[in-house]
Image: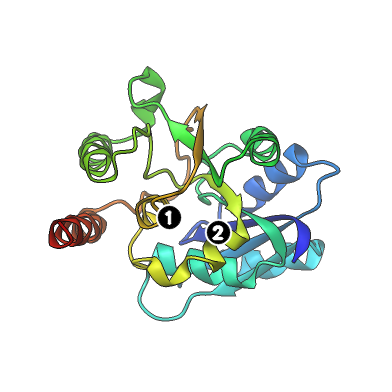
Amino acid sequence: MKKGLSIIIPILNENHNILILEKQIRESLKKKHYEIIFVDDNSTDNTINTLISVKKKSKKISYYIHKGSRDLTRSCFLGINKAKFSQILIMDGDLQHNPIYIPKMLKILNSKNVDIVIGSRNFKKRENKSLSFFRLSASKFLIYILKILSKKNLKDPMSGFFLFHKNLYLNNKKKFYSKGYKILADFIYNIPSIKVEEIDIKFRERKFGYSKMNFYVLILLTIFILKKLIFKLSIK
């Protein structure tokens, strides 16, 4: 595996955000060896045409189409499997994750004995007014339950912004639930020995498009939690 960073960005109808995000990543990672992999989940806007255009302008950019029913986790796994570099960063394509934090996350992963670095939202700060009442309430509830199940006191185990070594995925891929919209929870709660470091990030407001968090996503997350709970009870 080559040394470098593969940035996996699952997208759905993010046509207005792609060029802005690519520029912000480029400006934040000057002199860094990286690639950007967009994985589209069957967008219905002009996303594909924009991806074709941006790929022609830069050899660092590639894109794939996730076929089948829409699923963010499976889109991420597709991107990870296609990644050519040894370190993987997952981030959203809606501009709410700011690329300025990536160098700090890389420094921590490369200097400390950790498996994964999370860009965590601080739900106690006013800056998270960018989250709707539904998203904020659902996130707080699920984080509380996941803390109980995992016995890990993490601020944001459902963040969509995190960095890890690709081998962490390759060595544990058979353990994952592999479904839904919160891939980080899959990593943390299916790899008990995982070593985690968190940094606080400022979660930006979405300017274009709409959130993917809805009742269907909440149901998938609840199923994930119930399966973990049932499994824990069954081995006692």
Q: Nearer the viewer, residue 46 or 8?
A: 8
Q: Which mark is residue 104?
A: none
The C terminus sits in image quarter: bottom left
Q: What residue type is disc 2 on? A: Leu
For residue 234, what is the image quadrant?
bottom left
For mark 2, does the 10 Å Cα neighbourhood hold few (<14), some (14 to 19), or many (20 or more) residues? some
Asked whether residue 45 appears in the rendered view, the answer is no
Callout 1 amino acid? Phe
x, y percent for residue 163: 58, 47
Residue at 20%, 38% (x, y): give it. 141
According to the picture, the residue beneath numbered tag 2 turns out to be 168
Whichever of labels 1 and 2 marks the residue nearer the N terminus, that label is 2
Point out residue 29 in the picture as x, y percentages from the top left corner. Answer: 76, 42
Q: Residues within 10 Å of mark 1 (few under 14, many from 20)?
A: many
**Residue 62: % across, % down:** 69, 68
| Side of 48 relative to 137 (left or right) | right
Q: Is disc 1 placed on a helix, strand or loop?
A: helix
Point out which mark residue 187 bears.
1
Which residue is at the front of the view, 158 or 86?
86
